[in-house]
Amino acid sequence: MRLLRGGQSKHLEGNTLESIILIAVMFAMLYFFMIRPENKRKKEADNLRSSLTVGDNVLTIGGITGTVCAVKEGTVVIETGADRVRLEMTKESIATRFTKDAKSGESK
């Protein structure tokens, strides 16, 4: 076992401090690049689902498009297609809300 001399112990203390700073920087980068954007997306999705109103055109996570007919506490009733099929789904199944241009028929 080697005994550390004065210069070597200071060198080891510097490496330890650098390692701690590097780990702290890596956690900060993880937060700002992964965790924070995901929390923002969740908050936007919650705002979308809580602001659904009758008449909104929506797209579900399963790819079904339709118009909201009724909004209940935890569910939404959407009407799809010209045959007026109505489906009751949970609010969590709504992916996006969109509008159609009357002239072009394209969705935004």
Image (cartoon, grey):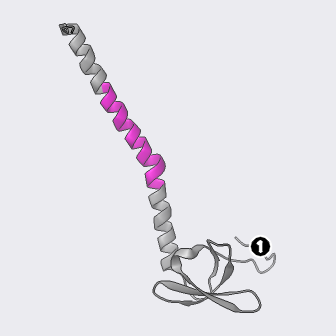
Q: Is residue 28 magenta?
A: yes
Residue located 48% across and 55% down the image: 37
Q: Is residue 8 magenta?
A: no
Q: Quadrant of the N terminus?
A: top left
Residue located 38% across and 41% down the image: 27
Which quarter of the figure has residue 73? bottom left
Camera-side residue of 18 and 2? 2
| Residue annotated with mark 1 | 106
Q: Point out residue 108 in the picture as x, y percentages from the top left corner.
A: 69, 70
What's the amino acid at mark 1?
Answer: Glu
Most frequent secondary structure within the magenta stretch: helix
**Side of 50 where 83 appears, left or right:** right
**Side of 92 where 3 appears, left or right:** left
Q: Point out residue 99 in the picture as x, y percentages from the top left corner.
A: 68, 77
- Give the crowd class for mark 1: few <14, some 14-19, many >=20 residues within 10 Å: few
Q: Which residues are magenta?
A: 18-37
